[in-house]
Image (cartoon, grey):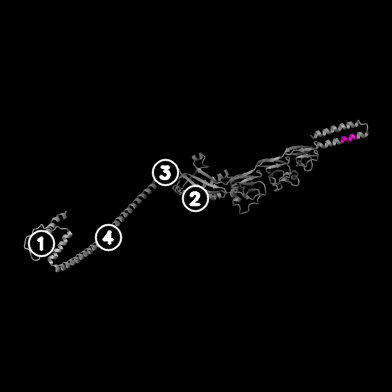
Amino acid sequence: MSAIFLLAGLILAGLIVASATQARSYQLRMVALGFAAVVLAIFFTFASFRNVGENSVGLVNKKFGFSLAPGKIIATEGEKGPQADILPPGWHLWYWPFIYDIEMRDIEVIPAGSVGLLNASDGQPLPRDTTYAPEWPEGKERDMQDATYFLTDGAGYKGPQTSVLKPGSYRINPKLFTITQVPATTIEKATVGVVKSNVGDRPAPVADGEADRPSGRLGRLVAKGQRGIWRDPLLPGQYYINTDAYQVTDISTAKRVVRYTDATVQASGQHEESEIIVRTSDGFTFPVDVRVEYEIEPQNAPLVVATVGDDQEGLRNVMNSAVRAIFRNNAEGVKALDYVKQRSLQETQSSQMLQEEMKKLGVTVTGVRIGDVGDEETLGTLLKTQKDREIAVQEQETFQEQQRAAEQKKQLTKTEQEAEEEKRLATASYEVQIAEQEREKVIIAAGADAEAVQIKAEAQANAYKLIAEQIGGGNAALVELLRIVGEQQISITPKVMVVGQSGTAGQSGETTALIGTMLDTMLQEAPQQKK
């Protein structure tokens, strides 16, 4: 477009000049020449306009000027070549096409979840023993993106930059910075990120006396900002860092289990390592199934990276070596049968030893479990002998227990008999006491009856005596007989004929007849009473 404006201006100005030469008046020719100059100037000025779109930047390359200093690539003082300043969106004047080439580029867009890694093509040489340019201070990132400031007052360094472009849109000079987009560093849950920094100041040398410490002998940990493995890991979250300058190793903090079991289980994919083969002091060799539970606490994750590199193959190799060595060493001091019997003791000893060993690497062992010990092929004969011995011992114990039970039963029977005898003795004693009481009761009752009879007899005798004295002995007897007849309902019809002389002393004929009748009645009733 600029070239067309310039060509059109030249043509139009040439036509005006050609027309002016044919004018008769000197004044007209001068006016025509002046107008041609104005037209040429206008078109020449319009030819210098450059328009940059809203989402673009204009890269300026100067065709004329002083040459760049040796080693420089980007011009900062108008030298010939690519210019540090870029053209922002809008119209720009004085950029004639025969002096400047203007190249349009899209602005740089860093999407969310990504970072832009910068590599500067110009600037100061990197300091000695460094691979990445020092990180720009916080708040100075925009100054770094200004190519002119970067190459002049900012004193930026050539090469890979530690600072990155976070998500956003940037108008940056692509002649100075090459931008590579990479994913942001994301630390998932139950994970921490251990940072190995390739930039920053080197830590002070390890002092005497610190060589035996894990942080010295196995990998010195450094503070954030220093070169080396940072002491503090990155917690779960998203970080915009240079993944080349800062190498981040993900370390799981979840509890994990390593199983050491036989090949059949191994083939099914339910474990991680093969079984452990141990040899006891009495020469038995047999497999032991072991399960090791462990975890890496967040604050210990950097030590794991410093010692074994990661929590995968490196840690697995070291742990396998330690587990196998500990179980084999512990088995050398015991007999096979004792090893089988003392499983819990073996677990405790092995757990303590493994905890101490893995603590040096930053790994926390939370448990050691022993599963099956040996099999039919390796310990079958020994276990059968032990089984037979145990059965014999148990049978002997059973027989002894039966003897004890019989003795106890015998003692119980004796005790029961004694208790029964005592019960009978107590019953007899009570019966004797009762009989004595009954006898005394009967005696007392008999005495009372006799006394009553005696008193009654005496009373009746006294009564008869008094009656006899008044009415006479015979009459008194007759009165008593009549009372008895009335009470007993005795028939008094005479059935006995009494012949004799009346007037016998003390008796009369009537009385004799009455007595006979009563005796007859009593004789008739006697058999009935026996029935």
Name the quarter where the N terminus is drawn: top right
Kindly identify the amino acid type of the residue bearing the numbered disc 4.
Tyr
Residue 35 colored in magenta in the image: yes
Badge 1 element: helix
Say what amino acid the circle numbered 3 marks.
Thr
**SS state under label 4:** helix
Compare marks 4 and 2 and give the one earlier in the sequence: 2
Badge 3 is on which residue?
381
Residue type for callout 2: Thr
Proximity of marks 4 and 1: CB atoms separated by less than 8 Å: no
Alpha-carbon span between mark 4 and mark 3: 71 Å
Residue 348 has which mark? 2
Q: Earlier in the sequence, mark 3 or mark 1?
A: 3
Please, is residue 509 above or below residue 137 in the view?
Answer: below
Mark 2 vs mark 1, foreground winner is: 1
Q: Tag on residue 113?
A: none
Is residue 238 at least partly visible in the picture?
Answer: yes
Residue that extends furthest to the top in the rendered view of this protein: 22
Is 437 located above or below residue 390 in the figure? Answer: below
Q: Earlier in the sequence, mark 4 or mark 3?
A: 3
Residue 111: percent from the left, percent from the top? Answer: 67, 41
